[in-house]
């Protein structure tokens, strides 16, 4: 892996040309059928989800999307879902369990939308509900952190049996700017915060937070999207194949044990 600073990796993770959820769905899955709405309030386009085939196998695929230009950024709220988006995601995951389909999630978000209206409609409860229900879902879940994975907005799609992470992606409790603002009252020190937060794929693999790093082309995923799609395809195929060997009775228990063990004494990657 190239020797880049954490701040440089954050910049690559945020690159506007980086492949996103739409690219992965179009490039890796066939017969994708989008499902919309949370059945309570409205459709949230910042989360895309539906049914598809992955190498001929039915799956449910869900991911956050930012867009690649200002018009799309505004349409998708810069990849910051509201509670309706998380309720939609949960609805699709529960449907996947009913029909015994594995779930694949793609994570690329600066965080859940923090606006007053989102809080009024139950943002915190929606995220908490996803964490609770994903922890006990009786089908395999594979999460792929493709760009930014910040805060509970990312974790709401990240409680998975296998968590994969692209080489230059980042995964953290909040953005470096938010971290610097809280710790030093100075968002301008975000580069310094990147080094302290241990948000790179290498850091998180060593801590056991993720299970595998997916390599990227030199300079980042945006420099060779086709090669990146192929690398993600291989990693997803291997992860789903391995999870096929686990019985339905054990799949939720192993996921629960995995997350309960994080941060415990002696916890290491692979445990």
Image (cartoon, helix red, strand yellow):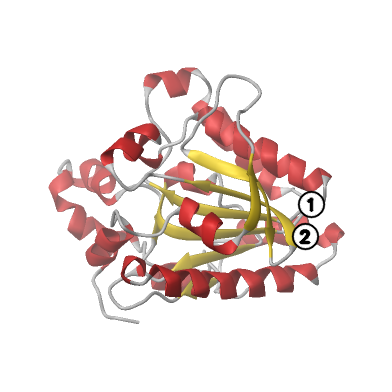
Q: Camera-side residue: 255 or 266?
A: 255
* In the foreground, 233 or 88: 233
Name the residue that disc number 2 marks: 251
Task: Between residue 210 and residue 266, name the one nearer to us.
Answer: 210
- Rate crowding at label 1 as few (under 14), some (14 to 19) or many (20 or more) other CA atoms within 10 Å: many
Q: x, y (%) of residue 215?
A: 43, 76
- Identify which residue is drawn at 33% across, 65% down: 222
> With respect to residue 148, does 241 lie above or below?
below
Label 1–label 2 contact, CB within 8 A: yes
In terms of secondary structure, where does tag 2 sit?
A: helix
Disc 1 marks which residue? Answer: 138
**Residue 180 tag number:** none
Q: Looking at the picture, how far across and down is residue 257, in whole percent? A: 69, 60
In this rendering, the answer to whether 26 lies above or below 80 is: below
Classify the position of the N terminus by image quarter.
Answer: bottom left
Mark 1: secondary structure: loop
- Left or right placement of residue 110 versus residue 238 in this view: left
């Amino acid at each position: 892996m190239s020797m880049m600073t954490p701040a440089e990796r954050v910049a690559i993770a945020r690159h506007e040309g980086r492949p996103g959820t739409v690219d992965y769905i179009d490039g890796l899955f066939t017969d994708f059928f989008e499902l919309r709405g949370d059945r309570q309030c409205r459709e949230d386009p910042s989360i895309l989800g539906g049914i598809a085939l992955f190498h001929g196998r039915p799956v449910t695929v869900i991911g956050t999307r930012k867009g690649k230009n200002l018009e799309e950024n505004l349409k998708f709220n810069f990849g910051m879902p509201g509670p309706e988006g998380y309720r939609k995601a949960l609805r699709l995951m529960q449907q996947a369990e009913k029909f015994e389909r594995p779930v694949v999630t793609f994570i690329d978000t600066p965080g859940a939308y923090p606006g007053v209206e989102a809080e009024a409609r139950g943002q915190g409860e929606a995220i908490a509900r996803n964490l609770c229900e994903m922890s006990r879902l009786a089908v395999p879940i594979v999460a792929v952190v493709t760009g930014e994975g910040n805060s509970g907005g990312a974790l709401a799609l990240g409680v998975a049996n296998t968590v994969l992470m692209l080489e230059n992606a980042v995964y953290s409790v909040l953005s470096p700017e938010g971290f610097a603002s809280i710790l030093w009252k100075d968002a301008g020190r975000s580069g310094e915060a990147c080094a302290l937060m241990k948000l790179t794929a290498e850091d998180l693999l060593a801590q056991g937070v993720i299970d595998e790093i997916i390599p990227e082309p030199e300079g980042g995923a945006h420099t060779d999207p086709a090669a990146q799609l192929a690398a993600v395809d291989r990693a997803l195929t291997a992860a789903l194949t391995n999870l096929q060997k686990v019985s339905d009775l054990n799949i939720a228990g192993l996921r629960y044990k995995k997350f309960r063990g994080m941060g415990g004494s002696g916890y290491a990657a692979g445990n």
